[in-house]
């Protein structure tokens, strides 16, 4: 298994078993949700237990810098569009605010409309 795969494919990992290097791909339901985002936004929200509330948020997505409606607000009050948030998660494998590095759970986030 090629070690370089790990650097270009975040879901690809290597581990050592009895002196042999084994490559494997992580199946992650949050990353899988990315493929559903375009045609099933509400279903993705439901799957991640993200509540929708009516709340005016002035800031744009910190990652793509586009204004979005709705927009996802993290417990630290930084805002991301769901697409950027899931892409960031897929790349980094952790639920951490890109801006302030605070760890969050998806069910603590709010879909602001
Ligand atoms: Zn974005
Ligand atoms: Zn933050």
Image (cartoon, grey):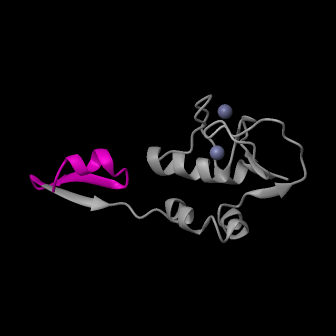
| Residue 21 is inside the magenta segment | no
Residue at 25% across, 51% down: 5
Residue 76: quadrant of the picture: top right
- Is 83 in front, or is 29? 83
Residue at 46% across, 43% down: 92
- Is 86 in front, or is 19? 86
Residue numbers of the magenta segment? 1-20
Residue 39: quadrant of the picture: bottom right
Q: Quadrant of the N terminus?
A: bottom left
Which quarter holds ligand 1? top right
Give the residue furthest to the top.
Answer: 100
Q: Is residue 55 left or right of residue 67?
A: right
Residue 59: quadrant of the picture: top right
Q: Is residue 113 left or right of residue 81?
A: right
Q: Is residue 22 left or right of residue 113?
A: left
- Is 15 in front, or is 32? 32
Image coordinates of residue 17 in percent, x first then y, are 16, 56
Q: How many marks?
A: 0
Image coordinates of residue 66 in percent, x first then y, are 69, 41
- Is 41 in front, or is 105? 41
Give the residue furthest to the front.
Answer: 66
Image coordinates of residue 50 in percent, x first then y, are 73, 57
Q: Is residue 100 left or right of residue 113?
A: left
Give the residue furthest to the left.
Answer: 19
Image coordinates of residue 57 in percent, x first then y, are 84, 40
Examine the rendered structure and indicate whether residue 111 appears above or below residue 56. Answer: below
């Amino acid at each position: 298994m090629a070690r370089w795969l790990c650097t270009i494919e975040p879901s690809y990992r290597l581990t050592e078993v009895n002196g042999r290097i084994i490559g494997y791909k992580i199946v992650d339901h949050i990353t899988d949700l990315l493929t559903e985002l375009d045609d099933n936004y509400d279903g993705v929200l439901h799957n991640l237990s993200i509540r929708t509330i009516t709340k005016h948020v002035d800031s744009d997505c910190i990652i793509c810098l586009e204004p979005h409606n709705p927009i996802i607000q993290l417990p630290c009050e930084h805002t991301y569009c769901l697409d950027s948030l899931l892409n960031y998660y897929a790349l980094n494998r952790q639920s951490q605010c890109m801006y302030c590095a605070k760890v969050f759970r998806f069910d603590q986030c709010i879909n602001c409309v």
